[in-house]
Image (tube, rainbow, N blue to C red):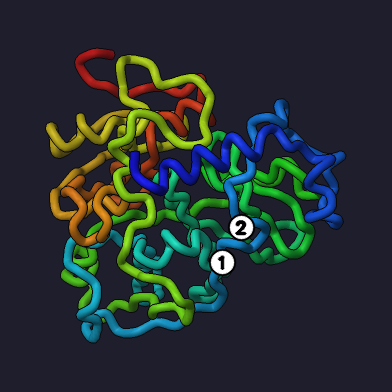
Amino acid sequence: MHIIAIFWLIVFTAAGNAGPDVWRGEWPDTDFGVNSVGNWAEIQSGGPPKDGIPALNAPQFTDASERSDIAPSEPVITLELEGQTPRAYPIRYLIWHEIVNDRVGRFPIAVTYCPLCNSGIVFDRRTPQGVLSFGVTGKLRNSDMVMYDRQTQSWWQQATGEAIVGRMTGHKLRALPAWMESWAEFKARNPVGLVMAEPAYNRDYGRNPYRGYDTSRRPFLYSGEMPPHGIQSLERVVRVGDRAWPLARLSREKVVREAGVIIQWVPGQASALDTGRISNGRDIGSIRVRDGQGKDVVHDVMFAFAFHAFWPDGKWMIGARQ
């Protein structure tokens, strides 16, 4: 077993089921009495304390044409908002920081990535209570990152965008159409696009600290039910609403037209969670999800266990086996 796996298993054993009574010292301004958590045992310490994984705020950007330090196959999260210059947020940075608080035109956004679930979602930070800024709690629920907002100290589930603890409980962030693709794909389509500059932190950007994770037998810090239909827990699925298409199916069929969406798969994107260097990861391909009018659709590419954990009644789009 790799060192990172041993580390997480030790953390899991030591952390136990802490619960809010233990967390109040670290979170004195969080109202734990207001929550939608049915079972506190689902929330575990991931090891780092509050802000131990430092979220980024107001990042700098450079022209895509000027960057030569990112390998063509490396994954980026792409955001193309109407009327704005397209932006790429490299996973080589997000794997170490997990949240980027940014502003694109009039849109205050949060670009989020949970390595343990492979979930990458861009949220609109505007809420009825004002614009929020997000950080990393250091807690995990069903192995998915629990975020917090700095204004109310409420906790938010990254995979669903919903507040689960504190004054904001029940509120849900609006997800924006964004997708993961290779750096080469982004540059080819957006030669005058922007890419996030390297953060001013002492990190080995480009290294994958979760080496071998997406070929592990089981996810870390997860004790829930495994996916049905013989789907492996760490198989990637494309989630659109409460439906999930296995990436293995999409890579075979290349284009799938179902449930009002068109999903297209192309090769060329490296897995960020495979080898020690992200650029050397195996080719898992990239997908785009559009509606019948060709507009990009909000979706996520996450691990199957996470979809099953947060959408237990969701529909599995497994093709001929349905």
Q: Position of residue 88 (x, y in %)?
A: 34, 69
Q: Residue at x 40, y 37 (%)?
A: 240
Would residue 286 be visible to someone looking at this image?
yes
- Mark 2 or mark 1, earlier in chain: 1
Q: Position of residue 190 (x, y in %)?
A: 23, 73
Q: Is residue 183 above or below residue 8?
A: below
Q: Quadrant of the N terminus?
A: top left
Q: Is residue 262 left or right of residue 149?
A: left
Q: Is residue 98 above or below residue 292?
A: below
Secondary structure at numbered mark 1: loop
Spatial CA distance of label 2 from label 1 is 7 Å
Q: Residue at x 28, y 29 (%)?
A: 258
Q: Quadrant of the C terminus?
A: top left
Q: Is residue 73 left or right of residue 229?
A: left
> At label 1, which amino acid type do we have?
Ala
Q: Quadrant of residue 304?
A: top left
Q: Is residue 70 above or below residue 151?
A: below
Q: Residue at x 47, y 81 (%)?
A: 200
For disc 1, the marked residue is 55
Q: Position of residue 39 (x, y in %)?
A: 71, 27
Secondary structure at numbered mark 2: strand
Q: Quadrant of residue 160?
A: top right
Q: Residue at x 51, y 31 (%)?
A: 222
Choose between 68 and 139: the one closer to the eye. Answer: 139
Residue 136 is labelled as: 2
